[in-house]
Image (cartoon, helix red, strand yellow):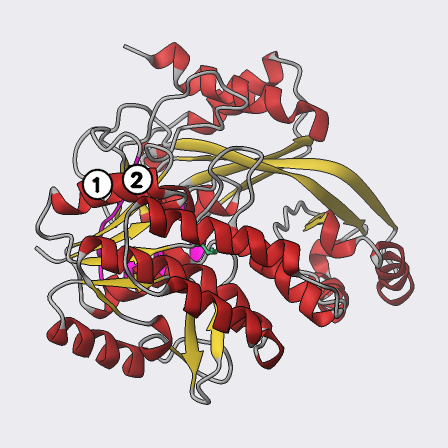
Amino acid sequence: MLKITKFGGSSVANATQFKKVKGIVESDPSRQYVVVSAPGKRTASDNKITDLLYLLDAHRQYHVDASNVTKIIRDRFLSIKNELGLKQNLEKDLDEFFANLAKMNQAEIVSRGEYFCAKLMAEYLGYAFVDAADVIRFRMDKTIDWDATTKKVQAKCAKYDHFVFPGFYGSNANGQIQTFPRGGGDISGAILARCINADIYENWTDVSGFLMADPRIVKNPEQITHITYSELRELSYMGASVLHEDAIFPAKEKNIPIHILNTNRPQDKGTIIQESIEGEQPYAITGIAGKRGFTSILVYKKHMSNEVGYIRKVLSIVEDYNVPIEHIPSSIDSFSIVVADSDVEDILYEMVARIKNEIKPDYVKTKSGLALISTVGRNMSAKPGTSGKLFGALGSNHINISMIAQGSDEMNITVGVKEEDFNKTVQVIYDTFVTKEKK
Ligand code: ASP
């Protein structure tokens, strides 16, 4: 059994968490290859090491004295070292790092959180340390060079039976450090899993997997025990955040199940993410997720359906402004373009003016303050009446739906509602498909 075992920031936040990690790793001999994030928050008001490193970089850029920040970073790492009685000369490594800041770029600075954490973890577990800069290779266009990376990962696995690997970064062909987006330690783990064709990618965090809805909205939502990659992609994109959404692709390509587990409650079952799931699903839906902050731009023109290329012309104007489009619900004489508020903040009026001048619709109406809520379920397509049930429930709860989009694979129904109806909508959908269906 080949496993990649990845621990997130909260799982390595202090010496107590390191001890839990050791217990987990040692309880299963197949946990040979361990990936770590940088130490995260120990309490809600604490700082993540990576955030402090970004702050350190800002001090460097603006030539501000950074001794306060370096002291906090130093103390965090040294307290882990000292509490665990580790012997490596971390003091010297940290001194060298702080002395050389001027020569480093931002990526190198912020990657040191994972680097020092992995060095400590390697000594603590008695495993080798493998530097991600020697293994994960980025092309100059910032994409992964899969051939080079796969060869390097496999060579390290052939050399070492056990190692600890820092997440979040790699290097390019010039030897410069490059990082993944924030939270990207999950991507590093998925890359390693793909390169060795692992049987499973374990991702240890501080929650016992995915819940069917956001617990800040729905009280005690049910746990999702099994979910497909595609369902998870929809839910993550719409705001369910446990795993970085880009970590799904490398695992999916090789059909490697991802198991989300809780370092603080290792006995919990967690959530397994895989290509397909056999057997009955407990509910008609798998989960609900949503985001606030969208604007819809409605374009109306009589007999639009007879005019070839009309939608394309409007879209090409939107494209000129480099605005990503979320949805394009359409009817016979009109269609809407749904975009994130943050993408059109400064250009909405100019863009609408161009649509009016160049395309000459009868009218254009913009509406902001929209929330999008997706109800996701792999078995929805097989169950007639699911959408009717959803719309009916929202209607009888006086929630006005301003947009509906259903993916062609019928795995997802997205509704647009006013932002102030966001929580109520999630609750009503949950009650309709879960609370009322509970056996
Ligand atoms: N340490 C990085 C971050 O805070 C990456 C990670 O934790 O996965 O974004």
The image shows residue 220 at horizontal and vertical percentages of 42, 17
Which numbered dot is residue 334? none
Residue at horizontal 61 percent and vertical 17 percent from the top: 395
Q: Residue at x 26, y 41 (%)?
A: 19
In this rendered view, identify the residue nearer to me: 296 or 333: 296
Q: Which residue is mark 2?
A: 227
Q: How many marks?
A: 2
Q: Is residue 435 left or right of residue 216?
A: left
In the drawing, does residue 38 fall left or right of residue 260? right
Under tag 2, what secondary structure? strand
Q: Is mark 1 within 8 Å of ligand 1?
A: no
Instruction: Report if residue 246 lies within the magenta region.
Output: yes
Q: Quadrant of residue 120?
A: bottom left
Tags 1 and 2 touching, CB below 8 Å: yes
| Residue on which disc 1 sits | 277
Q: Residue at x 50, y 33 (%)?
A: 43
- The amino acid on which the numbered mark 2 sits, given as a three-letter code, is Ile
x, y percent for residue 57: 63, 66
Q: Is residue 333 visible?
A: no
Who's the residue at 35% across and 13% down the image?
437
Identify whether 64 is placed above or below 239: below
Residue 113 in picture, x, y percent from top left: 46, 59
Viewer-side residue, 192 vs 338? 192
SS for tag 1? loop
Q: Position of residue 94 (x, y in %)?
A: 47, 66
Ligand 1 within 8 Å of the CB at mark 2: no
Image vertical order of residue 272 relative to residue 106, above or below? above
Q: Picture quarter containing residue 269? A: top left
Q: What crowding class fits label 2: few (fewer than 14 Cα within 10 Å), some (14-19), or many (20 or more)?
A: many
Question: Would residue 310 appear left or right of 182 to someone viewing this image?
Answer: right
Magenta range: 243-263
Q: Residue furthest bottom?
A: 174
